[in-house]
Structures are given as structure tokens and as C-alpha cells.
Image: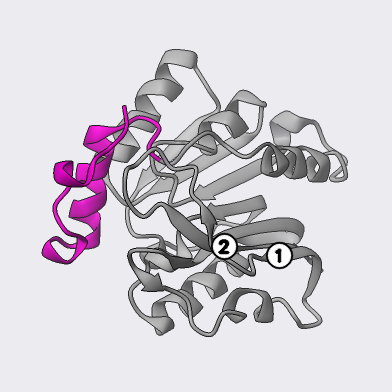
Amino acid sequence: MQIDREQLPPRESLPPQAWWDKFWTLSDDGLGIPRKEFLEAVEAHSSTLGKAIEGVTVVDIASGNGRYAIPFARMGFQTTAIEFTENGAERIRSIANEEQLPLTVLCGDFLALTPTPQDIVFASGFIEELQTHAAQVRAIELMQQWTKPGGLLICRYCIEISERGILITPEDLVPRAFTNEKWKIISKMQDLGMRPSIANISFENSLRTGTVVAQKI
């Protein structure tokens, strides 16, 4: 089911948690299917760690309805989903319980959690939802703390969304955080222009994104 604008109140009328809670009451797949390249990157890195896939830990930050956490768990990873909203968290728990997946769900504010280092840290669509530059910087610092030495961090973010404007300034905020001796950037990408969104919604239909994949030294 596609989500129409009329089904959701304006973002500015609700706190972020309440808006997203409403969003997840309306759609199971509003943000689209998981991207194959991220699943493949996680699988490829896990093969370098020298342990069985069942012993590799993965955390999905701002998991939503489990768009990535559930596929990670289905692949066999010991997965933790961190989700801000009760509605989203409950959707993930329901599927995890039904399928008996190796998936733990934490419902709460990522910025308030104590880091538990993981082999692989994944975040998609999180940084741009934080409302201040300071919060965005703090989130990146925490994601780095959640990553074990030798671990992989994948961060995908929206620089700009057509109906919301620029969401991350400066644009190199995320990649710049990994240009030091503690990190090796494996790949980085930023869209030069706006492109159509794959989200199953009738608004915010074009965006500009960036992705950083980095390994902790």
C-alpha cells in the first residue's frame, strides 16, 4: 500500500518519534526493499572475520520495520535492531518471533544507548532525521564506538529530499569523520543530482544520498 500525504500529518506538527510511529502504522514496506549491494557487503565482510556466520554480530540502527535487520537475521547473523518507535519495534519482534530469527530488538533513542561493539554496524536513513548538526555529529561518533576493531560500518544518508530541502550540512559531514588513522574508507558515494526515491510514498519523491563504507583499524 502506498502512503499518501493525506494519511500523515505534517512533520512539524508532531515530535519525530510520534510521526514515525504513525508512519509505521500505515505501511509495512514504505521505505522499499533492502538494497542488494548492502546485503552483499555485509556478507563479504563477515567472510573475512574468521568465524562462522552465526558468530558474527550486526546492529541495524534506526531499523524502522526491520527492512535490513530481518534480512541480516535470515542470513544467520546475530542481529540487533535499534528502533526509536514502539510500532516499528513491535513489527520487527513479531516477524523475528514468528520465524525464530537470531534477532534482538531494542526500542529507544540510539543517542542514549551505551555502545556495545559489533562486528558490523549498519545505518540507513538515520543521520538526516536528527534535527541538529550536533546530534548528527554525535550519532556518527557513537556508530564508530559501536564498531569493533576490524569491523565494518555502513552508513547511508540523505543529503537532500525534494520536499524537505538540505538535511545534512556540510555535505561531507559523514565521509570526513572517517578520514583519519582509525578508519579505512572502502567506498564512498554522493549523488551529484536529485534522483527518484524508491520509497512507497506519494511525496518526498526525489532525493540526493551519500553512502560511506569503512573499516575500523
Cβ–Cβ below 8 Å for labels 2 and 1? yes
Answer with left or right where residue 17 lies relative to residue 73: left
Between discs 2 and 1, the one toward the N terminus: 1
Residue placed most toward the observer, 38 or 120: 38
Residue that label 1 marks: 189
**Residue numbers of the magenta segment:** 1-30
Identify which residue is drawn at 58% across, 30% down.
71
Point out residue 185 in the picture as x, y percentages from the top left corner: 79, 68
Residue placed most toward the observer, 161 or 151: 161
Identify which residue is drawn at 65% across, 42% down.
57
Answer with left or right where residue 175 lies relative to residue 170: right
Splitting the image into 4 quarters, where does residue 121 fall? bottom right
Which amino acid lies under the numbered mark 1 shown in the image of this protein? Met
The image shows a total of numbered marks equal to: 2
Answer with left or right where residue 205 lies relative to residue 26: right
Q: Is residue 14 above or below residue 71?
A: below
Answer with left or right where residue 42 lies relative to residue 158: right
* Tag 1 secondary structure: strand
Identify which residue is drawn at 30% across, 32% down.
27
Which amino acid lies under the numbered mark 2 shown in the image of this protein? Thr
Point out residue 67 in the picture as x, y percentages from the top left corner: 49, 36
Residue that label 2 marks: 209
